[in-house]
Amino acid sequence: MTFASSPRPTCCMWGQIDFACELVPGIWVVSTPSHGGLILSDERQRAMPDALRLESNEYEHDCNWSLVYLAFEHEFAALPDPYEPVRIRHAHEIAARWKPERHAAFVASRDAAGETAKP
């Protein structure tokens, strides 16, 4: 599936955005004076697997960002940044540790679909 770029967000649940960078079309990494995380376009939010989707399209940088990385792992893995494989592995570790039910359900759904999850 191909996703469209989305407009730069200007504010979020954490306040006024100081920094925003679109990582891949429709997924923005943002920071505010107090916090930050990933903000998904409506299209991306709808594409999040049920096991990983939160009610809000804002995924904070402490743990919830890992859910977005799992959902769109193949796109992140294709980025030219040499640290992306480390981030993907870290996302699996964080989700397994802090969101174990979501991680297990997602891995099970990928296995059932004949895909392999990378721990």
Image (tube, rainbow, N blue to C red):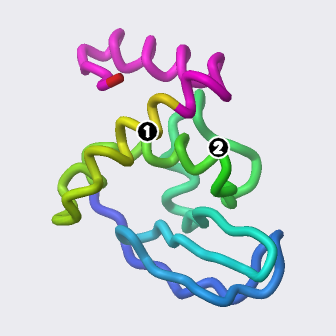
Q: How many marks?
A: 2
- Any mark on residue 63, and which? 2
Q: Is residue 17 above or below residue 48?
A: below
Is the Cβ of the residue at disc 2 closer than 8 Å to that at disc 1?
A: no
Q: Main secondary structure of the magenta part?
A: helix
Q: Looking at the picture, does residue 98 appear above or below residue 19?
A: above
Look at the image and give the residue range highlighted in magenta.
94-118
Tell me where residue 42 sits by quadrant: bottom right
Q: Is residue 108 left or right of residue 53?
A: left
Q: Is 22 on the left-hand or right-hand side of 19?
A: left
Q: Nearer the viewer, residue 24 or 41?
A: 24
Residue 13 quadrant: bottom right
Say which residue label 1 marks: 90
101 inside magenta stretch: yes
Tell me which residue sits at (37%, 71%) in the image: 25
Mark 2: amino acid: Cys
Q: Viewer-proximal residue, 59 or 94? A: 94
Q: Earlier in the sequence, mark 2 or mark 1?
A: 2
Q: In the rendered image, which quarter contains the C terminus?
A: top left
Q: Nearer the viewer, residue 7 or 102?
A: 102
